[in-house]
Amino acid sequence: MVVSAEVLLHESILEALRQCMNDGSLPLDAVPDDIVIEKPKNPSHGDWSTNAALRIARHLPGSTPMDIANTVVAHLSENTAFSRVDVVQPGFINARLSGAFIDAQLTEMYNSPRLGLPEVEHPQTVVVDYSAPNVAKEMHVGHLRSTIIGDALVRILAHLGHTVIRENHIGDWGTPFGMLIEHLIDVGDAEGLEELSVGELGAFYREARTTFDSEPAFQDRSRRRVVLLQSGDPATLKLWRTLVDASLDAFETIYSELGVLLTREDVAGESRYNDALGKVVEDLKAWNLLVESDGAQCVFPPGFFNRDGSPLPLIIQKSDGGYGYAATDLATIRDRVDRLHADRMLYVVGMPQSQHFAMVFAVAAMAGWLPTGVEATHIAFGHMLGTDHKMFKSRSGGTFQLQRLIDEAVARARSAVIERNPELGEEDCDSIARMVGIGAMKYADLANDRTRDYVFDLDRMLSFEGNTAPYLQYAHARIRSVFRKGNAAPAASVTALPALAPSERALALHLLSLQSVLEDVAITCRPHTLCTYLYELSSLFTDFYEQCPILKAASAEERENRLALAHLTGRTLREGLGLLGIAAPEQM
RNA sequence: GCCCCCUUAGCUCAGUGGAUUAGAGCAGCUGCCUUCUAAGCAGUUGGUCGGAGGUUCGAAUCCUCCAGGGGGUACCA
């Protein structure tokens, strides 16, 4: 298994510290846990650097960081991984990797079908709750972000060896369904389904809403229909099922077009937890957590306040006897812990719901439904904005249909591809345009820190310059092109010995940091760090490509090795993009 | 009122305690195509990191206060 230079240096430093403690050269009580190993920006500061001595100096008043650093370095065990270890002002320890170490690491990565990535030692069962559109409503941009981010996290966690369970918590239950079912009856099955199937979900919903708001008789029917639905009336359930199925068809069309992993198997809608809601109330009551307030059954988790400064309730059961989504979310947590044995639950839902989740998790913990060791995290994301920095809207001011957005991105990608490579056949052009257009949309979303709002700008995301999917895809295609042009096969091996040119070395070192980047994304759930990694990889490859002729290298050995480096870069790009849910075309 | 998030170059964004110059890309300016894809490269212009204090040997980064923007704050999800 590959041990990264970062981990190796960290362990070596810790080991040296223990030695220092044993022989009394550093009178420490404990090894500090805030030692940082980092990659210096300035290459003259080595490949890896640590501030260990500066951190320790805080615990040892009277001693200087320089002295501590020298003491630590003197206690470092012999190590072939580092060709030199320096202590510099004001007390940093800088290490430079040896050619032999880079060679061994690179070889391992090159020969591994997994690019040297180890499977996690302790696989977790991770439930990822994402996408979650509403039945009989259009998917909107909020669902788009959730879908794209969630899907990337699913792929990354699964690739690292975790057991990942996708759950699409669709909105398929609740009072609006009385109205929707009555509307379906009014327009007739055939027409209603027609309308739903062509993706006009929004129109269907709006018509129902309009009728509901203007016709008291329709309101009455709708209310009665809700009661029928909840009591399990077979005819009503059949109509409900019709609506759900039609919507699922529409969602699946979008998912498959986007290249998202979600299928019907992953649907775990609100309706599924319906029967568990009564037990949620019952058990909360048994724990004496439930308080009746203004007629509603509530739990008051500590630390939450409303406008008046009085405690804020999580409403489990409304005063009319109906359940709110808090009840469903609690039932869902129980199901995921008890039935799925989740170690970790990720909720990829927009930022505005952060308080809701904080309260739900707090109540779940109070009720013992979230045992210690089981993590529930709200993976929040910001709004998608238009180029005017306002909430993303179509030109006419309505919500944007996702399908239109996709179509436009693909169409524009197509004309860009055709313009630059007119020799492509019709079929190639179509498939490349899809990969580029959809990849661009996904990448633009993923490349920004998810917690911030981001500006959706088709021009920018489809640009072949800068931190965009087309740029990365192009870097990959260019590598493939080198092999086609040179009629070359990937070399059997790669080496870093006797020495690499500076741009080769920089490329190699960056390739080797793939593992730590992915591990970081798995912990923080911030896929944009993988995007940054891939973008830097492409930039470093471009440097290499400019400075080191591959096919026209000076010797056969050099040519082979550069082909190997190019091949490894190409594989890493394809794998990295794949983990983001983005395809890498062979040519563009 | 209270709570949460945001504010880095003209624009879009990285950078959550470090190393005499805060990084990219776009836009602007100057060069570079008989040479593995110029969809590129090299150079250059541009920032008192919203403001003020504080902690520290060291702050875009941590703490406090202030300003501006967004969101949440009991039966919608």
Image: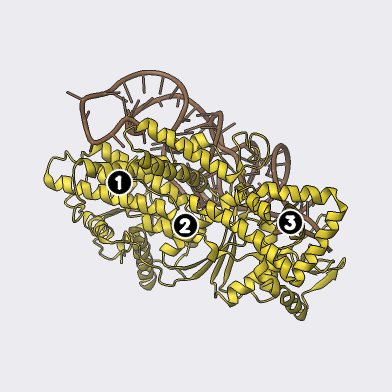
Chain colours: A yellow, B brown
Asked whether the residues under marks 2 and 3 belong to the same chain, the reply is: yes
Q: Residue furthest left?
A: A555
N-terminal label among 2 and 3 = 3
Residue located 21% across and 54% down the image: A494
- Residue A347, can we see it? yes
Residue located 67% across and 51% down the image: A191
Marking on residue A506: 1
Identify the subunit bearing mark 3: A
Report how far apart the C-alphas of labels 1 and 3 lie in the structure.
60 Å
Under circle 3, the secondary element is: helix
N-terminal label among 1 and 2 = 1
- Position of residue A177 relative to residue B21, above or below, is below
The reply, left or right, for residue A96 in relation to residue A436 is left
N-terminal label among 1 and 3 = 3
Q: Position of residue B48 (x, y in %)?
A: 56, 34
The amino acid marked with disc number 3 is: Leu
Report the quarter where the C terminus of chain A lies. Answer: top left
Marking on residue A363: none
Please identify the quarter of the rendering in which residue B6 is found. top right
Q: Do residues under tags 1 and 3 come within 8 Å of each other at their CB atoms?
A: no
Residue located 62% across and 33% down the image: A388
Under circle 1, the secondary element is: helix
Name the residue that disc number 2 marks.
A521
Report how far apart the C-alphas of labels 1 and 2 lie in the structure.
22 Å
Q: Residues within 10 Å of mark 3 (few under 14, many from 20)?
A: many
Name the residue that disc number 3 marks.
A180
Under circle 2, the secondary element is: helix
Disc 2 or disc 3, which is closer to the eye?
3
